[in-house]
Amino acid sequence: MTTRLPIYQVDAFAEAPFTGNPAAVVPLETWLPDAVLQQIAMENNLAETAFFIPIPGARDADFHLRWFTPAIEVDLCGHATLATAAVLFDRLSFGGDLIRFQSQSGILSVRHLDGRYQLDFPARPATPTRVPDGLALALGGIEPVGFLRAKKSMAVLADEAEVLAVRPHFDFIAGLDGDGLIVTAPGSETDAVSRYFAPHAGINEDPVTGSAHCTIVPYWAERLGKTSLHCRQVSARGGDLFCDLAGDRVLMAGAARFYLEGAINV
């Protein structure tokens, strides 16, 4: 028997149409089998598809939220969380200005601000370590000035021009330890810029990555001596994140643009 489900496609961290990171959002009443969730994400062929169900009567969370790339389930995703909150606030009439999600990474909240949605995520500070052999070649001949590891690895480059000039060798990056590779540098017009590559998860380059900023923001906050940062992910689509380091949490705000609304049959 075919089941018909609503679906939304939302550009997250998008200040204008066709920018930011597209995410699919599929509201559910109860969980479908994991294999079906993965097949839906594969069919959508976006960086992430978010699925959520209500948690009636829960004290600490309103919904249970999960995220799937076309290849795997992931434990944290910023842009698809922002997209989910936009759907709940703007299309499903969620009351109040704060939504709490239960997730693999604990309780995540999203606050509805004027024109933006602010995520409250765990900080994931990185530890400096030696630059892996062959990394400069894998970045197109660009030598990092530093290399750090958290859940995601992070290469620090000299300036924004070098971040833009990276020509990644995806097979090499897929073989690195951890959850993909961030490249970052000081921005020419923002506090910091970045790109993020996750070929191991079926995403060669992610347009805008909230979870990467759980590591980017603590790093640049310490080096710049400030806790409020304007960050930009300089992918082909590009996206802006307005971030604050609040102890062991990273707050990141961005806008959302609705692109598609409809139904799928599974």
Image: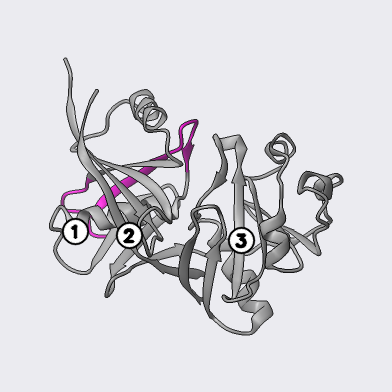
* Discs 1, 2 touching: Cβ within 8 Å: yes
Q: Earlier in the sequence, mark 2 or mark 3?
A: 3
Q: Which residue is mark 3?
A: 194
102 vs 133, left or right, is left
Q: Position of residue 28 (x, y in %)?
A: 21, 38
The residue tagged with tag 2: helix, strand or loop? strand
Range drawn in magenta: 54-74
Say whether residue 188 is magenta.
Answer: no
Q: Amino acid at mark 3?
A: Ser
Q: Inspect the image, locate mark 2, and give the three-letter code of the amino acid beneath it.
A: Ala
Mark positioned earlier in the residue sequence (1 or 2):
1
Q: CA distance from mark 2 to mark 3?
A: 20 Å
- Look at mark 2 in the image and give the residue it sits on: 256
Identify the mark nearer the N-term, 1 or 3: 1
Q: Up-down: is 84 above or below 249?
A: above
Nearest to the observer: residue 20 or residue 173: 20
Separation of marks 1 and 3 at Cα, in angstroms: 29 Å
Residue 72 is one of the magenta-drawn residues: yes
Which image quarter holds the N terminus?
top left
**Residue sticking out furthest to the top:** 1
Tell me the number on the disc at residue 90. 1
Q: Secondary structure at mark 3?
A: strand
